[in-house]
Amino acid sequence: MAEFWAWLHYPFMVRALVGAVLLGVVCPLLGVLVVLKRMAFFADAVAHLTLPGVVLAMAGQWEVRSFLLGFTMTAAAGMLWVKDRVTQTADTVLGIFSAAAMALGIVLLGITQQTQGKLLSFLVGDILAVGWIDLVLLTGLTLLVALFMVTTLRAQVILPVQTDLAQVAGFSVTGLNYGFVLLLAAVVTVTIKVVGALLVTAFLVIPAALARQKARSFMEMLWLAPLVGISGAVSGVLGAVLVNAPAGPLMVLVMAGMWAFAVSRG
């Protein structure tokens, strides 16, 4: 146990715990809208889009995060545009986009001959390697998400229930939807270095799903989801030190266990 407490004095552990708190706020907060809008599959498709984006950035020797931000935001907006204009169901369209994004990434990886080691760091992430710049970006993104939620609160309460009512009330449904999608792409882009593209959807969905199970109102969801996210993320980081396991997957397992317990209790 003394060795465990000694770990907490290392700067990288301090950064990891701060990153866990920020991650536990920003993803679940936006995840509330993901769950209410039934767009978990959309979030997953955006996460898969990061694969070809990272490969293209490495092949072009561009700064990965900047290129990836523009790539995912453009692609996410394009997905929303297509989804709103085809007659097939949303899950079918998003399933096609998700599979195509993964396939494109794998093809590009073979063509460009990029090393899989660099790509792996973006797929699985590593919160223990988070730097101060990452924390600054996470902090700014958290504030941006919080501002979006506050300024569009009335519309967000109505939109998941009745789109027509939101339009009658004078809200720009199209603008809100595209704003949400662009913000979702930004969250995925910034957080994949921390938790990885393969697991980022879990941080968006699981805390919000648990909050929806227990909350009696939209406002309760907005504070309960981040509380679950912070608890799961911090517990996962600390547990990773204790059992010498990867922090990202452990954080997801902790949150999944919390959700399973909540569901079993009704």
Image (cartoon, rainbow, N blue to C red):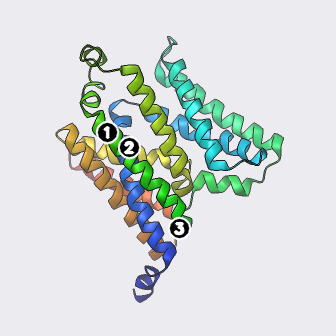
What residue type is disc 1 on?
A: Met
Separation of disc 3 and disc 2 at Cα?
24 Å
Residue at (71% x, 45% y) in the render: 57
**Looking at the image, do the residues carrying marks 2 and 1 touch, with CB atoms under 8 Å apart?**
yes
Q: Is residue 57 above or below residue 129?
A: above
* Residue 193 image position (x, y, % from top left): 56, 55
- Is residue 63 in view from this perspective? yes
Residue 145 badge: 2
* Residue 224 image position (x, y, % from top left): 25, 50
**Looking at the image, do the residues carrying marks 3 and 2 touch, with CB atoms under 8 Å apart?**
no
Toward which corner of the image does residue 117 lie, by quadrant?
bottom right
Separation of disc 3 and disc 1 at Cα?
29 Å
* Residue 39 image position (x, y, % from top left): 42, 31
Q: How many marks?
A: 3
What residue type is disc 2 on?
A: Val
| Label 2 SS | helix
Residue 149 badge: 1
* Near-viewer residue (235 or 184): 184
Judged from this view, the residue extending furthest toward the bottom is 2
* Residue 150 image position (x, y, % from top left): 28, 39
What residue type is disc 3 on?
A: Leu
Residue at (47% x, 21% y) in the render: 90
| Crowd class of label 1 (few under 14; some 14 to 19; many from 20; radius 10 Å) | some
In terms of sequence position, does the residue under pointer 3 or pointer 1 come before the other? 3
| Label 1 SS | helix
Separation of disc 2 and disc 1 at Cα?
6 Å
**Which residue in the structure is indicated by mark 3?**
128
